[in-house]
Amino acid sequence: MKKIHSLEMESISKSFHGIHANQDINLRVESGEILGLLGENGAGKTTLMNILYGLYQPDTGRIKINDAIIRINNPVESISHGIGMVHQHFMLVQNHSVLENIALGYKDTPFFFPKIKIREQVKEFSSQFDFNIDPEKKVWQLSAGEQQRVEIIKALMNGADLLILDEPTSVLTPREIKELISILREMKAKGHMIIFISHKLDEIMDICDRVVVLQKGKIVGSAHTKNTDKKSLARMMVGRDVVFNINREKLAKGKKVLRVEHLNVNNDKMLPAVKDISFDLYKNEIFGIAGVAGNGQRELAEAITGIRPIESGKVCINDKDVTNKSPRYIYDHGVSHVPEERIRFGIAPGLFLYDNAILKQHHLKKFSKRYFLKYSQVKSHTKTIINEFKVSTHSINNQIRNLSGGNIQKLILGREISEKPQLLVASHPTYGLDVGATEFLRKHLLQLRRQGSSVLLFSEDLEEIFELCDRVAVIFAGEFMGILDSGDERLCDIGLMMAGSKKI
Amino acid sequence: MEEIIISTLQRTMVAGTPLLLATTGEVICERSGILNLGVEGVMALGAVVAFIVTITTGQPWLGVLVAVGAGMAVSVIHAFASITLQANQVVSGLALTMLGLGLSGMLGKPYVGKPLSIKMDDWAIPWLSDIPWLGKIFFYQSPFFYLAILLALTSWFFLERTRLGIQIRSTGENPKATETQGINVSRLRYLSVLIGGGFSALAGAHLSISYSKSWIEGMTSGRGWIAIALTIFALWNPARAIWAAFLFGGIFVVQYLLQPLGISPNFLSMLPYFATLLILFLISLKDPRKLNAPAMLGEPYKRGER
Amino acid sequence: MIKIKTSDRYDITAFRSLMTNIFSLLAGLGVISIIFLIAGVNPLYAISEIFSGSFGSVYGIKETITKAIPLILIGAGLTLAFRAKFWNIGAEGQMLMGAIFATWTGLTFGNGLPSYIIVPMIFTAGFIGGALWGIIPAFLKIKYSINEVISTLMLNYICAEILTMLIVGPWKGKTRFGFPGTDNLPDSAILGLIPGSRIHYVTLILALVCAAVLCVVVYQTRFGYETRVVGENPDAGKYAGINFLKTSMILMAVSGGLAGLAGVGEVAGIHRYLGYPAAVSSGYGFTAIIVAWLAKLNPLYAVVSGIFFAGILVGGDAIQISLGLPAATVEIVNGTLLIFLIMGDYFLNNKITIRFSNKGHD
């Protein structure tokens, strides 16, 4: 295998179900270079890198290594070409030790006593790059940063000259980020090339030599980091100056609906994910929580709706304490929830549309009488939702798994709004929807606000936040970077706040 | 007194042998992520096949070999259903048990109650069998006993100390990550299910041609199911399976020991089943992260799904 | 080069589902024929004997209905448990526990009470017995995450030993001349038969009613709704605020209770006394698993599939006599059919296209 001196992607395009994920992308990296790939979520960064790693095939375009055209059909071929990738969600066996994980993927693992040889090799690599991990530990005992280093070692031991890192810092602590950066610099000095995917401006400016900005699947700009600054990169990434929607009518602030006080919540790994968050939410108000996914939004939403236990702090609905109450209790006190992972939480895939249309409401008087469900009401209710929310399906006697993501989302939103909740917790309600459905759902959220409900809106989409919200909080690493009114001039810096480089 | 203790322990080893064989097989199978509830049926089939071949050819080892082959062959059904067709592993395993029990009953009908004149002699290990007490207990046993321990240790070695073992275990933990390393998940799973089937059949062979030296329908009497529970109790580790199996062998033997005391034999027959529930209860008190249960046990894996 | 492509199928109609089942059964019969051939029996003859033995004569039909009674009861109950992905393999034990409770009630209170009081009493007792035996694994699973497959099975063995212990010990009847078994139940507690048959019609009616009621429960009630949601997607169940412990315990009480009723029918309708466990349960608890699966987990369809498998049991008895095949033949038939039924599901849920091309790759 020859060492990679340069890698080029030429006019790469890829679309899924008619939606362009990548359009005519050209990109070149050379050895000893760190290239930043900057863009919002859904800009097409990960798709592009999965093409390079052989997980997807491009619709058009080609890849060249050292100016020779190559074809990459699967990750194994990509590894043999000297390309390594560290995925955002690590491809590690959690219950196995570091050595076993490395032995699994390493091409020269001996059959007998594999760990002995791997141990030596790991030691060698660790001293070269200052990795500092206990190779006997199980992966689940390691911090996210250490797990990431295991992934990097795996790639390097298989001879990766080009290393792709997908959002490598999103799971790391500030100290671990520093360590990662020094490892990357060391690799650069040894002649490796690195593609660094991120949406955090600070890091891009700090680590990368060059940066390419992606927006909606296209390259919208590129620059040497020496010759640019964070502000202009932020503008390129967001793609517009901050403009507020003036169509949203002014409504007087109503009474307080939700009060959150010093809330602390853990994530699935029992690490703090929401740190001492406090805020109030009023009638006739849409309160936006902007931020890149994975910064504690999910845990916050689940804690408020009762799915996730609260470690400390308080959640009150209309001055009633609902901290750590059951989801049904909280629902009955007027809180609806459009969950982040619709398929996982929001529906029972094999059941009919009308069954799913009452998932949280089947116990209400309206739909049940003693032990029985009133299916005639349920069905007419379902029909109302389908008509009102334009869910396209040939029948309500259809298993919901047959519907498209957009239609499922419309049904869930319809279901959650239909009972006129006092508070709607909506997590990324328009994520992955087409333009029409998105506009439609946003109108409904505004209508809800007009009717006197309040909405807690989690979104990564700044356009959505600006269009809908009366107030915006920016969340980063489980903390609020600031809470701003929609008229606040400081909102221009929202990109910086989302990237964690500015706190108000 | 000394006699009683020695003979009890000796019989404990005998009673534990089939449990150890079946448990070891199920450990390998489950490590690759496939739950096989067919152990009981495959065991019965192994027992009857070994018995028939032995009684007709007079070659006990040939009987063992054919039984292992039959066990592997019938396990292909479960492998195909649960790996290739991604069927529900619980139901598929149950079907295998029904089929195995049925086949064994049909094949064994003419042989019910026939005594086996060809004996598989016990092996006395030179020197070691002369050690007082221990010699009789551990070194004057049926070849199956040595085989079971040897296979358990070998299995442990293969799972923990070879590349193949790491691959099999990774398959059960995270098939997607394993597949991206260029490893064929289905092939490893097929292999593991077949090995598991072979071990179960071996356990059955021990029952019919060494333990009771006869064939009666239902002679496995739930040992296959107990082996599945022991797999959990052994924390999916073949080395731990050794003492888990012999502990249960002891419970089987204690029944006979207590019978003269006037305790109802039916009550004593319940002991292994009670003990099974008890150990599952005790295991549940442990921190689930330390249980070592294969993370994707029983989950069908569909290639290319993200 | 043959290329096989599979993709998820979304348009599953009732008709396609039925056809898949029928094709699976036919394929299963094909394999069974091969087994018969190997066993030296003409498969066409054997299979026609099975079906003429069960459905081909008035006697056969009567026997088939008799054996369908426990299969329908247990099978209908299992559809509920399996719907919630609760793998209840313990119907045998639950059936025996029902029989034990019923026998005790009948022997203790039966003398002097008229039928219309004692018969409902023994059925109630049987239901309670089966339900209690069913609740144990539900509790163990939710509270201590003990695998229900193993716990229900172990409880089968334990219950069989308890029963044996009772009939050789304290409950041993004076009229049994030293053989194990209780005395006969008092006449008032014995279920009436349709003349000229062994069909204990009270249990038959009960079975049909239970299947119908359960169908209403599954598709019309809040509880049935929660059961289906939990089985389809436990995470959605959590999101919807469903109490898992309560739901599991209720559904296992029902599933076990129905098995208990089947036990009552066998004791009070067929045997008239409590004898050896194998005679009382005769493997109905296991056969009912296939009944539930063939019914696509619909309690009402369990009536049809229960009759079908009862036919196989009766036909199996017939060929034992006429062809000299062992009793285990029925188990082979059952096991093979179950395997083909679950394999059939793959072809129901996946669209498979086979393409022939000359090139090495696409």
Image (cartoon, rainbow, N blue to C red):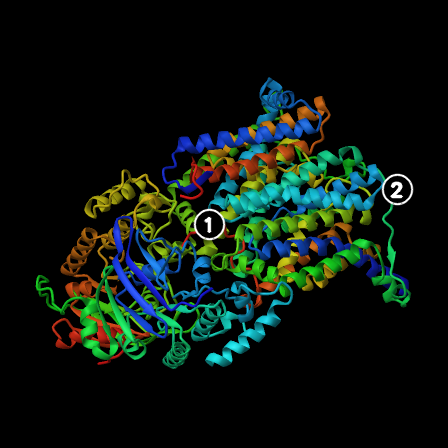
Side of B277 relative to A387 (left or right): right
Dividing the picture into quadrants, the one containing residue C110 is top right
Which secondary structure, mark 1? loop
Which dot, 1 or 2, sits closer to the camera?
1
Q: Quadrant of the C terminus of chain A?
A: bottom left
Give residue A499's mark.
none
Please give the chain letter of the residue carrying mark 2: B
Labels in figure, total: 2
> Looking at the picture, do discs 1 and 2 lie on one chain?
yes
A235 or C140: nearer the eye?
A235
Which secondary structure, mark 2? loop
Q: Can residue C15 be seen from the camera position used here?
A: yes
Please give the chain letter of the residue carrying mark 1: B
Q: Earlier in the sequence, mark 1 or mark 2?
A: 2
In the rendered image, residue A81, in percent from the top left (x then y), is placed at 43, 62
Residue type, numbered disc 2: Ser
Residue drawn 26% across the image and 68% down it: A212
Residue at the spot of label 1: B302
Residue at the spot of label 2: B117
Q: Are marks 1 and 2 in contact (CB under 8 Å)?
A: no
Q: Can residue B1 be seen from the camera position used here?
A: no
Residue type, numbered disc 1: Lys
Q: Is residue C317 above or below residue A89?
A: above
Q: Is residue C165 above or below residue C71?
A: below
Q: Residues within 10 Å of mark 1 (few under 14, many from 20)?
A: some
In the rendered image, residue C362, in percent from the top left (x then y), is placed at 40, 43
Q: Residues within 10 Å of mark 2 (few under 14, many from 20)?
A: few
In the rendered image, residue C255, in percent from the top left (x then y), is placed at 52, 44
Side of A177 relative to A494 (left or right): right
Side of A483 relative to C205 (left or right): left
